Image (cartoon, rainbow, N blue to C red):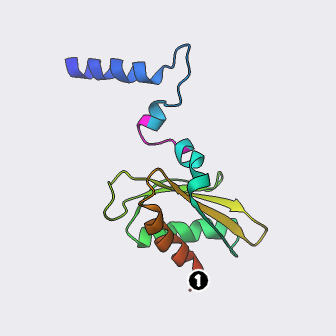
Amino acid sequence: MKNTIILFIVMSALSVSGCSSSKYNLASLAGTNVRDLEAHKDSGITRTFNIPRGEAFDKTVSIVKNAGLTVFQRNPKKGYIVVMGFKEQVDTTRVGIFFEPASETATKITLSSLSSLVLPKAEKIIFEGLAKPSS
């Protein structure tokens, strides 16, 4: 019981920002925030595919699941998927997949991660999968 109370106090303290603001909050500490991945989009890998945004999103979800990866978060409305579970990476290494319409029939897709080692692996799985014609 004592440990539960201490844990509650610590978690409460972390979730309150007080008078100062911090770039870290409880969501980012728990790995549920995508802002850090969005901030690294400039150093990510981007390609444009001749697939409408919704179709590209759904096909990407299918590709990553078939590759044995974990879809940690997804938001079709905001246009992102967060994936984990790449081989030879720490289980919690996240890759953000961001979808932006390039036109009505094309989608710009950016892969972003805080780990530069996982990006080539993600590129091979996701971009090669998207380049294949749908069956």
In terms of depth relative to the viewer, which is nearer, 48 or 82? Answer: 48
**SS category of the residue bearing label 1:** loop
Magenta residues span 29-34
In magenta stretch: residue 33: yes
Task: Say which quarter of the image contains residue 30.
Answer: top left
Q: Which residue carries the number 1 mark?
A: 134
- Could you tell me which quadrant the C terminus lies in? bottom right
Task: Say which quarter of the image contains residue 26.
Answer: top left
- Could you tell me which quadrant the N terminus lies in? top left
Q: Is residue 132 left or right of residue 70?
A: right
Q: In the image, what residue occupies the spot 65% across and 51% down?
A: 78
Estimate the x, y position of residue 16 in percent, counting from the top left: 48, 19
Q: Amino acid at mark 1?
A: Ser
Estimate the x, y position of residue 7 in percent, counting from the top left: 29, 23
Location of residue 85 with respect to 11 vertically, above or below: below
In magenta stretch: residue 22: no
In terms of depth relative to the viewer, which is nearer, 119 or 49? Answer: 119
